[in-house]
């Protein structure tokens, strides 16, 4: 059985008091669920969020980290710094990091390796751009993103990986991949992992879909057999919407 996961990526939104108030509202409204529920506030509010969620099942995860242990990397955060404030899961490879901050597959491979070396869990994001989909190149792109950042890992590392397929054309655009498009890509991803590693590893890895998931479309997307949950941007900033999505899993 694979873990079902609903994670909210809050990006550069919410100050500390807004973070605490959204977390209090979420905790109060959280439905009974078998799914893991995660939120990723901005770095400065991670510690406050951990404190606020002490007796909650909601996990606090980070949006990014640096691959180095420590040193002269102004503005960066290390794995140890996250672990020290009880954050043991990190998102790596979000399309905004790739597009706006120049994070290449090579950099992402180093980040994944550094996080796993510290026993962290990694939520690895990837997905094709609109032009790739229009030219029907989406499978090649996704395969090369996986190959370049993950397929050098040993088999044991896969128990600490979660994948998030996020077609760039569906992120923050209101445009969602159809449930059939999501299923087709998730099945392709699982099959690629099965061929590269083993059927067992492929069966166990959770693959989330991300891209304009809302309460109104979540149920249909989550009903697909290879979709194990969602990474949610905009809708995770509104408690009722995020709760509605969690209820859909
Ligand atoms: C995201 O940024 O990971 C995301 C899926 O955003 P949105 O839900 O707003 O499209």
Image (spheres, rainbow, N blue to C red):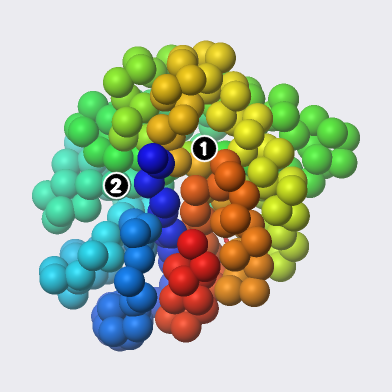
List x then y, in percent, for residue 8. Answer: 44, 63
List x then y, in percent, for residue 128. Answer: 69, 40
The CA span between labels 1 and 2 is 19 Å
Looking at the image, residue 55 sits to the left or right of residue 35; the answer is: left
SS at mark 2 in the image: strand
List x then y, in percent, for residue 89. Answer: 29, 47
State whether residue 99 appears in this view: no
**Mark sitting on residue 89:** 2
User: Foreground: 96 or 198?
Assistant: 198
**Mark sitting on residue 103:** 1
Of callouts 1 and 2, the N-terminal one: 2
Check disc 1: other Cα within 10 Å, few if <14, some if 14-19, many if 20+: some
Mark 1 or mark 2: which is in front? 2
- Where ligand 1 lies, by image quadrant? bottom right
Q: Are marks 1 and 2 in contact (CB under 8 Å)?
A: no
Task: Give the answer, above or below, for where 226 lies relative to 69.
Answer: below
């Amino acid at each position: 059985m694979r873990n079902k996961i609903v994670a909210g990526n809050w990006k550069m939104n919410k100050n500390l008091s807004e973070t605490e108030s959204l977390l209090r509202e979420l905790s109060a409204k959280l439905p009974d669920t078998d799914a893991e529920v995660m939120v990723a506030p901005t770095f400065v509010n991670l510690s406050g969020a951990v404190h606020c969620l002490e007796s909650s099942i909601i996990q606090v995860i980070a949006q990014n980290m640096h691959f180095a242990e420590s040193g002269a990397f102004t503005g960066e955060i290390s794995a140890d710094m996250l672990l020290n404030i009880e954050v043991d899961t990190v998102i790596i490879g979000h399309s905004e990091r790739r597009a706006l901050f120049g994070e290449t597959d090579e950099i992402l491979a180093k980040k994944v390796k550094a996080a796993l070396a510290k026993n962290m869990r990694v939520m690895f994001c990837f997905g094709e751009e609109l032009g790739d989909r229009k030219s029907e190149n989406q499978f090649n792109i996704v395969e090369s993103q996986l190959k370049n950042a993950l397929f050098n890992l040993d088999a044991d590392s896969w128990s600490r990986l979660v994948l998030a397929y996020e077609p760039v054309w569906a992120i923050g655009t209101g445009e969602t991949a159809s449930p059939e498009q999501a299923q087709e890509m998730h099945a392709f991803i699982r099959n690629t992992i099965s061929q590269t590693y083993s059927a067992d590893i492929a069966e166990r890895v959770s693959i989330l879909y991300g891209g304009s998931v809302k309460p109104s479309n979540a149920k249909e997307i989550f009903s697909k057999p290879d979709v194990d949950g969602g990474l949610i941007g905009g809708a995770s900033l509104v408690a009722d919407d995020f709760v509605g999505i969690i209820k859909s899993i």
